[in-house]
Image (cartoon, rainbow, N blue to C red):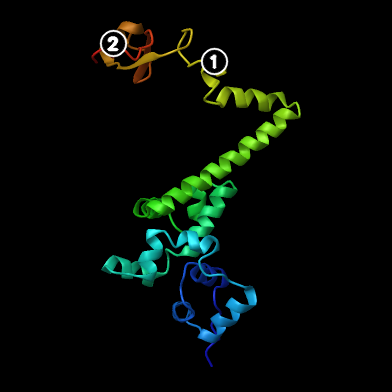
Amino acid sequence: MPAKRRIDRSSARLEWEAGRTVAEIATRHGVSRQAVDRLVKAEGWVRGDGEGATLAETATAQRIFRPVTAADFRVASEGVRTLARMKQALDAVAGGATRAVAAGLIGIGQETMRVWLKDDPVFNRLMAEAEATKTWRRITHLEDASARGDVAATKLLIERDPASRGEFGPPAATFGGEGGPALVLNLVLNADHLATLGGPTARAPAAAGLVIDHPPINDEQEAPAP
């Protein structure tokens, strides 16, 4: 007797919130309509509400639920790009993960994640919002630490905040300069040049760096020709 198939509750709930019917969810998960209906009633799922409703606006949701092209049918049938995986990635990033880490958590590569984001403007926007949420939480923690007298937190905030880093941030690194813009040239030295530096036994890197300081360029000035 074949094993009884169990429904993926989190995925089914997102699909219900996204507007899918009991019959559609049952077909996608290979379970009976009664099984889905029991979950809907027992857990109080609400169609058009929650994270599923937000994800329903994505191009991915449309491709999965209303495939048109051959590529759409492939996405829908492979079952890799799902609302549940997208939600997991967004939650991971909002919780502190990078996009690369989030991709690994949902079992895809970094390039695949980039394709998903490129193909789906709404998912890309939601990912940016998740990153903003992560950054805001960290800024809040730093602000709280600064308010408690943590000098290191205060220093970090004033050095990194765009409103103050120009005046209080560390100067740009230069070789022996006072900070500010610098032009870096890489010089490649051949054997004859090395000989003039110290004879045939002299050794030097294949490329040396030469830094030439120059005054900042104003908005009204044109950059010098290369």
Indicate the position of residue 190 as horizontal and vertical percent values. Answer: 27, 16
User: What kind of residue is marked 2?
Assistant: His
Percent position of residue 201, x then y: 36, 12
Q: Quadrant of residue 198?
A: top left
Q: Is residue 110 above or below residue 41?
A: above
Nearer the N terminus, badge 1 or badge 2? 1
- Label 1 secondary element: helix
Q: Quadrant of the N terminus?
A: bottom right
Q: How many other residues sit within 10 Å of disc 2, few (<14), some (14-19) or many (≥20)?
A: few
In the displayed structure, 194 sits above or below 3; it is: above
- Foreground pick, 169 / 174: 169
- Of the residues shown, which amino acid type is indicated by label 1? Glu
Element type where label 2 sits in the image: helix
* In-front residue for pair 85/158: 158
The numbered mark at residue 193 is 2
Q: Nearer the viewer, mark 1 or mark 2?
A: 1
Determine if residue 31 is in view: yes
Residue occupying image coordinates x 62% and y 35%: 139
Q: Is residue 98 visible?
A: no
- Picture quadrant of residue 212: top left
Determine the residue positioned at 27% across, 15% down.
191
In the picture as drawn, the residue positioned furthest to the bottom comes out as: 1
Q: Which residue is mark 1?
A: 167
Which residue is found at the position 51% from the left and 63% from the top?
A: 52
Q: Residue at x 52, y 44 (%)?
A: 131
- The spot of residue 116 in percent (x, y) is 39, 55
Report crowding for label 1: few under 14, some 14 to 19, many 20 or more residues within 10 A (C-alpha).
Answer: few
| Circles 1 and 2: CB atoms closer than 8 Å | no
Q: Point out residue 37 in the picture as x, y percentages from the top left corner.
A: 56, 81
